[in-house]
Image: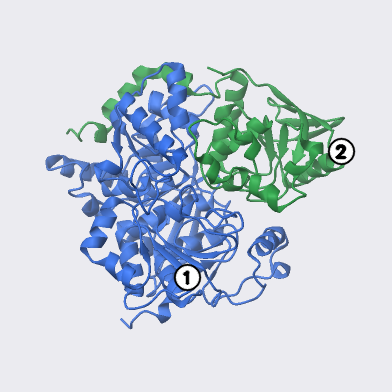
Amino acid sequence: MGKTLLDKVWESHAVRELPSGQTQLFIGLHLIHEVTSPQAFAMLRDLKLPVKYPHRTFATIDHIVPTESQARPFRDSLAETMTQSLTDSCREFNIEFFDLRSGQQGIVHVIGPEKGLTQPGMTIACGDSHTSTHGAFGTIAFGIGTSQIRDVLASQCLAISKPKIRKIDVTGTLSRGVYAKDVILSIIHKLGVMGGIGYAYEYAGPVIEAMTMEERLTICNMSIEGGARCGYINPDDTTFAYLDNRQYAPKNGAFDRARSYWSGAASDPDASYDDVVTLNGNDIEPMVTWGINPGQSVPVNGCIPDPESVAPDERDSVAEAMAFMSFEAGRPMKGTPINVAFIGSCTNGRISDLRAAAAIAKGGKVAKHVKALVVPGSMDVARQAKEEGLDEVFREAGFQWRAAGCSMCLAMNPDKLQGREVCASSSNRNFKGRQGSPTGRTLLMSPSMAAAAAIAGEVVDVRDMLNPA
Amino acid sequence: MDNSSITSVTGTMIPLRGDDIDTDRIIPARYLRCVTFDGLGEHAFEDDKAQDPGHAFNDARYRQASILIAAKNFGCGSSREHAPQALNKWGINAVVGQSFAEIFFANCQAMGVPCITVDRDSGERLFAIVESDPAAECRIDIASASIGIGDQTIAGTIPDGAKRSLLEGTWNATAVLLESVKEIDAVAGRIPYLNNFAA
């Protein structure tokens, strides 16, 4: 019987079985940011413990950085305190910090891959639920809380139980105007927001294999929205080509040796799975969420559901979502007016996302009543976009071009919805209050769909705006 | 290091109906702009409370509760430990739910706040009991994962690893992880990517 990538990575990183029956799992790469780590460093100081492997932890700031002016000190004194706290901790414990001055700052899940820190066969942890993103490289990567950050800093290990494994096969090919975001929203819609509890997701099949690394990052990023703490894609030539020449990737002879290790980490063809699910990629359409969790979505040409016509065990959730969103049951999704468009985040803030959105924005004008933000996921993404003139394309079309950070994904910096605003957003969560106004409303969609909505002033089918191939 | 054996949790309950209650709702992100967990308790469910006067956390009858009764997929979304910290500082010492998001569960466990899973019927029964009698005293026995209220006993489950860590007092894992420093270093010594993929 063959093994899955999960089996292989788990075995090679297992330090021992703990008395509780859980695994003591070695964490190969630890990423930290300013929000969830300060208390962990404080716990470490209380315990008078050092960081065991300081060169395996890397830091950046992303959640609280303002995206209009990044001049220090920040206007928000709390954000300034958090930044200073992380700066001090990194200095005290000798941790590399990609801060604003380094010119390498960005969203933690954008910079890990782009710097070549994220490599196949690794275990990765970070105090952020979207750590599942890194699974795109064939890693076992999961989000942890602050107490577990303390554990990793102190011991480079976690006490954790091995999840079950579900393979999600996406067959066929995607049509034009259908993106990785639409695939993952379709998967979550099918399996539900709690379908992944207790599982790691292995994404496979021709649609996934044909994807670029950036598309795969979008897929794995939202594993957690389906309830799966981690999700991964087996490493292949696309993965290896992406890593070649990255700053922290192995060089020369080591790269060739690494390649064989990385190939060997992939799931064996005869590996066994606890569950297998198949989706036909040919059927996937651009998706839009209408509710308050990422599973509450419809194809753009579909209708907002009627609480009366859904399964009895979903009725309360649908009714709660409808009450919050104030949408009319049974109405078409298309044509829903928006006030704000947000293009960015760890889900869709990479260069290919900005290129796709810019292709829609080019020559258009953002609707008069819409405020539209484009926020690159990292300083590197921003530089690349500028080299390609994308910032100018966006500005000419009436989008605001901002500096790198989490921005309007999560309401910890000045970029927030106001009142009942509706936002067409390329981010990952449509929870109540997620984008900063307790009553604000979020419609999740691909960056191209968000750009199209910005210009139309309402939800539209981006396929109607694409030139014929 | 706080790491005592936890064999039971007793107190009154607070019912929180609704599936998929995410950690953004438990503690809105604006309160994550901090470097300690102090003071989070007063902001638990702040926006939900403002929008729903009937929210259980607005109800004085439940203010002394120490056991939260939740529904399905409780604590989904963000990994912020601020969420269980806020609940704990509000007064919650255990959560009973029909299912839990994994990171939330792990965070509670690492804080020594047991999460007990019950089936749907038992969950509904618990809601009914506490809603009709907010003063009902409840005793959760960790070893049997059972919930006792008056002469009623409701069966629950706690995964073995979590249960044993609570009973043995190893839920704060740092010390136990550091017991095997030699083994940790041995693993680090043979992981190819930590050794330049040496042939």
Q: Residue B134 lies in what quarter of the image?
A: top right
Q: Position of residue A317 (x, y in %)?
A: 67, 58
A220 is higher (above) or lower (below) than A190: above
- Scheme by which the image is coloured: by chain
In the foreground, B16 or B193: B16
Residue B133 marker: 2
Kindly identify the amino acid type of the residue bearing the numbered disc 1.
Answer: Val
Q: Where, by quadrant of the figure, is residue A392 drawn?
A: bottom left
The answer for which chain carries disc 2 is B
The answer to which of A138 and A346 lies nearer the viewer is: A346
Q: Image check: B149 left or right of B158?
A: right
For mark 1, what is the residue?
A: A370
Q: Nearer the viewer, residue A463 or A72?
A: A72
Decide which of A203, A131 is in the foreground and name it: A131
Residue A329 x, y percent position in the rendering: 67, 72
User: From what the image shows, is residue A364 above or below residue A322?
Assistant: below
Residue A116 place in picture, x, y as percent: 25, 45
Q: Colour of chain B?
A: green
